[in-house]
């Protein structure tokens, strides 16, 4: 085989490999875009208020707060003017993070987890009485307090005991609250369970205000 033939085969092989690599690249890109689009389809955008849509009965303390509306789970909540939101899907739950502008600290000091379940009488009570198990840690209910929002919606403000798998038998108190609301759509046998978390006690005052202004649409 002469040198020209060898050069031709080498170039031909490089072209074939390049075509294969390029094909794999675009196939992976297409797959990722398709997956991202699936997630985007269930994401919502914060609602931009107009003078017509602005709540005239809104307490003055919330006057300059942003309005967040979730059309999938049919609820609204307000958050401070100079805060941002980020949405994600985590373990089949829809999660919205709230955090001050410029921090980009995810998951953020305050977050809302939205779940869908079958309608059950006192469904969130059943939820509270179940033991929640996450990776490396187990939880059980420590305290529950009935609360009522400004719109008259009733919910439960809870705290939890937790133990790590490396320290079984020793329960510790996580005194940062988790507030739980539920809305059952009986016609569809569909229950929306909303959990509002706080991860930084420095924002407790903001958290309490956000909980008070939460409502289902």
Image (spheres, rainbow, N blue to C red):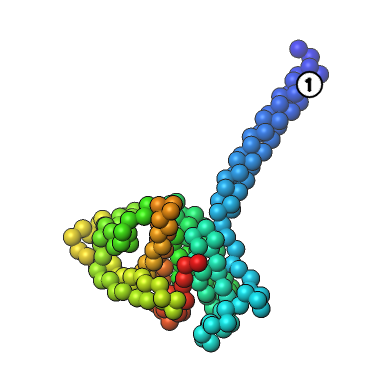
Q: Residue furthest top?
A: 1
Tag 1, which secondary structure? Answer: helix
- Residue at image position (37%, 76%) is 148
Instruction: Using a 10 Å C-alpha cutoff, classify the residue at mark 1 as few (fewer than 14 neighbours), some (14 to 19) or many (20 or more).
Output: few
Q: Nearer the viewer, residue 191 or 27?
A: 191
On the rendered structure, is 13 left or right of 141? Answer: right
- In percent of width and height, residue 123 lies at 32, 59
Q: Nearer the viewer, residue 6 or 42?
A: 42
On the rendered structure, is 188 left or right of 83? Answer: left
Total marks in image: 1
- Residue at image position (34%, 76%) is 147
- In percent of width and height, residue 3 lies at 79, 18
On screen, residue 145 above or below 115: below
On screen, residue 25 above or below 211: above
On the rendered structure, is 174 left or right of 67? Answer: left
- In percent of width and height, residue 75 lies at 49, 66
On the rendered structure, is 50 left or right of 204? Answer: right
Query: What quarter of the picture does the N terminus occupy?
Result: top right
Q: Residue furthest left?
A: 169
Q: Nearer the viewer, residue 96 or 117?
A: 117
Q: Is residue 175 visible?
A: no
Q: Residue furthest front?
A: 187
- Residue at image position (30%, 55%) is 133
Using the rendered view, name the quadrant where residue 115 is placed: bottom left
- Residue at image position (74%, 20%) is 9
The residue under label 1 is 8
Q: Residue furthest right?
A: 4
Q: Is residue 216 visible?
A: yes
- In percent of width and height, residue 88 lies at 52, 57
């Amino acid at each position: 085989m002469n040198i020209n033939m060898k050069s031709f085969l080498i170039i031909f092989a490089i072209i074939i490999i390049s075509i294969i690599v390029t094909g794999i690249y675009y196939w992976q890109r297409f797959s990722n875009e398709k997956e991202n689009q699936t997630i985007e389809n269930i994401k919502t955008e914060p609602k931009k208020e107009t003078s017509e849509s602005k709540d005239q009965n809104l307490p003055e303390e919330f006057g300059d707060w942003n309005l967040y509306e979730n059309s999938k789970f049919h609820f609204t909540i307000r958050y401070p003017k100079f805060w941002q939101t980020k949405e994600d899907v985590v373990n089949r739950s829809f999660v919205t993070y709230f955090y001050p502008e410029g921090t980009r600290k995810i998951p953020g000091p305050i977050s809302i987890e939205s779940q869908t379940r079958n309608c059950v009488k006192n469904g969130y009570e059943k939820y509270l009485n179940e033991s929640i198990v996450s990776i490396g840690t187990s939880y059980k209910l420590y305290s529950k307090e009935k609360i009522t929002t400004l719109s008259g919606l009733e919910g439960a403000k809870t705290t939890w005991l937790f133990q790590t798998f490396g320290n079984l038998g020793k329960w510790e108190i996580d005194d940062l609250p988790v507030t739980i609301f539920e809305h059952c759509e009986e016609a569809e046998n569909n229950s929306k369970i909303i959990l509002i978390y706080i991860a930084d006690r420095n924002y407790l005052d903001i958290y309490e205000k956000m909980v008070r202004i939460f409502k289902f649409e």
